[in-house]
Amino acid sequence: MEATGYQKLTIPTIHPVSKWKKRIPYLVAYGILGITTLPIILMYVWLLLSSFSKKMKFGFIPTSFTLENWSFLWSNVEHGGSELPSIWTATWNSFVFAGSLTILEVIIGIMAGYALARIEFTGRQTIMKMTLLLHAFPSVALLIAVFYILNFMGLFDSIWGVVLVKTALQIPMTAWIVKGFFDDVPWDVEWAGMIDGCSRFQVWYTIVIPLIKPGIAAISIFSFLSGWSEFLLLYTFTVSDNNVTLASYLQKLISDPNMINYGLLSAVSLFYMLPVLVFFIFTQKSLMQVSAGGGKRV
């Protein structure tokens, strides 16, 4: 018999057309994303160019470079015949409001979420069913009622009063999100801690809380961003210049449509965005670790 030897291996050649067919879905996806995000990108580019320009030719091309629009950083701005508060006062108030809201919301939300996930009590099912409805209730419909409450408590024209109101409106959704993370923690972990001699609080604080750090990071980020961008409640319930925030500061710049300085408005808007961008850069890794969805236990 004739030896057959090794069989010759043939590597199939990939036709260029088939390569392009595989890339078509990616090209379509990136094309759609590029088209939909292009207006947003152009908007931010215009904002940057306008903040460093005295005048924009054809509404988009800067004619000359200037730092005059950023003079609010070292001096107070005069607008409409009056002097606006210091931008640093507004910045400090915005940080105080967003930071206080974040701390309160995280602490209360964690405790409420744990109670909903682990403790059986009367009305538990009703509370969970009403949670999303309470969060969806428009805050603008409560403005008059909130005004009377804050005025009665002596907290009108106080940032701390608005912090309490905003916290109360945010807690339902925060507790619901945290409950999902607690549902993902097995009961066996808690039982093992209590068998080792830990109290219920020690188990919750030293064992369970570290296991839901991604969830805590997520609600902290969203709470801070929600507080930083808040306008309606702060504009309604804080009226003095000492309690002005950056959102209210921007409103003062556009209060008179006939006197808007778009260069100054662009510069202040960029300044308002910078802390959010920095905050997102340092927290995006925590956001990426958050898994979508929670436990199914009710």
Image (cartoon, rainbow, N blue to C red):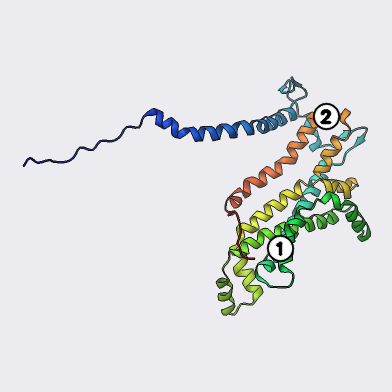
Residue shown at 78% from the left, 36% from the top: 268
In this rendering, position of residue 280 left or right of residue 15: right
Q: As shown in the figure, which amino acid type bears the numbered disc 2? A: Asn
Q: Is residue 276 left or right of residue 195?
A: right
The one of 297 and 167 positioned closer to us in this rendering: 297
- Sequence-earlier tag: 1 or 2: 1
Q: Say which element carries label 2.
A: loop
Q: Residues within 10 Å of mark 1 (few under 14, many from 20)?
A: some
Identity of the residue drawn at 61% across and 69% down = 206
Q: Residue at label 1? A: 128
- Badge 2: how crowded within 10 Å, few (<14), some, or many (20+)? some
The quadrant in which residue 182 appears is bottom right
Q: Can you say whether 257 is above or below 149 in the image?
A: above
Instruction: Give how far across and how far down residue 43 sits, in percent.
Output: 70, 31
Residue most extreme to the left: 1
Q: Horizontally, is 45 left or right of 143 in the view? A: left
Nearer the observer: mark 1 or 2; the answer is: 1
On the image, the x and y values in percent for residue 107 come to 72, 63
- Residue 21 figure quarter: top left
**Amino acid type of disc 1?**
Met
Between marks 1 and 2, how big is the CA–CA gap? Answer: 48 Å
Residue that badge 2 annotates: 261
